[in-house]
Structures are given as structure tokens and as C-alpha cells.
Amino acid sequence: MDALIGLAAFVAAALVGWAVAELKMKACGYHPNEEEVESEKRSAAQITRELGIKDVISSISTKGFKAN
């Protein structure tokens, strides 16, 4: 019987926590500024551009490191 009460208390606490998180999300809205919007547009433009094999090779380390 104690386990059932503990389970019910756990479920009730989880539901209360979930409700608080949902209400907080609705009460505290986020609005990005112009700088963030521009940065996201630039990132989207770079992501949609296809890379050639030369672009891939220049952007990854294929030569390794020199040992001293």
C-alpha cells in the first residue's frame, strides 16, 4: 500500500512540475533581436550551399599534425 501512495505522490509531483514548466513557457516568451535573425539567415544560406570536394578537403584536417 505504501508503494502505491509513493507512486501516486510521484505522479502528482511530475504533473505539477510539468504544468509549471508549461505555464512558464507561455508567460515568458522569447523574441530574437535583429542580430540573431541575421545570423540565422546567414547560417541557413551556408547550410543550403552544396560543398564540392575541394571545399570539403579545405575545411577538414587531412594532413594531421607535425610531431616535434
Image: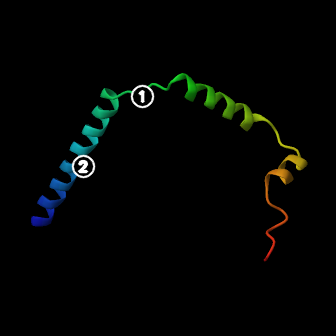
Q: Quadrant of residue 28?
A: top left
Question: What mark, if any, has residue 30 been given in the picture?
Answer: 1
Residue lying at the far bottom in this picture: please name it.
68
Tag shown at residue 14: 2
At 19% from the left and 49% from the top, the residue drawn is: 13
Image: 45 above or below 50: above
Amino acid type at mark 1: Tyr
Residue type at mark 2? Answer: Ala
> Which quadrant, please, contains the C terminus?
bottom right
Element at label 1? loop
47 lies left or right of 66:
left
Judging depth in this view, the residue of 14 and 38 nearest the camera is: 38
Q: Quadrant of residue 18?
A: top left
Category of crowding for the residue at label 1, using alpha-carbon neighbours closer than 10 angstroms: few (below 14), some (14–19), many (at least 20):
few
- Which label's residue is closer to the chain start, 1 or 2? 2
Which residue reaches farthest front? 68
Disc 1 + disc 2, Cβ < 8 Å: no
- In x, y percent, where is residue 55? 85, 46
| Residue 17 visible to an observer of this rendering | yes
Residue shown at 34% from the left, 33% from the top: 25
Q: Identify the residue at image location x=79%, y=76%.
A: 67
Quadrant where the N terminus sits is bottom left
65 up-or-down from 34: above or below: below
- Label 2: state its secondary structure: helix
The spot of residue 21 in percent (x, y) is: 30, 39
Where 64 falls versus 20 (above or below)? below
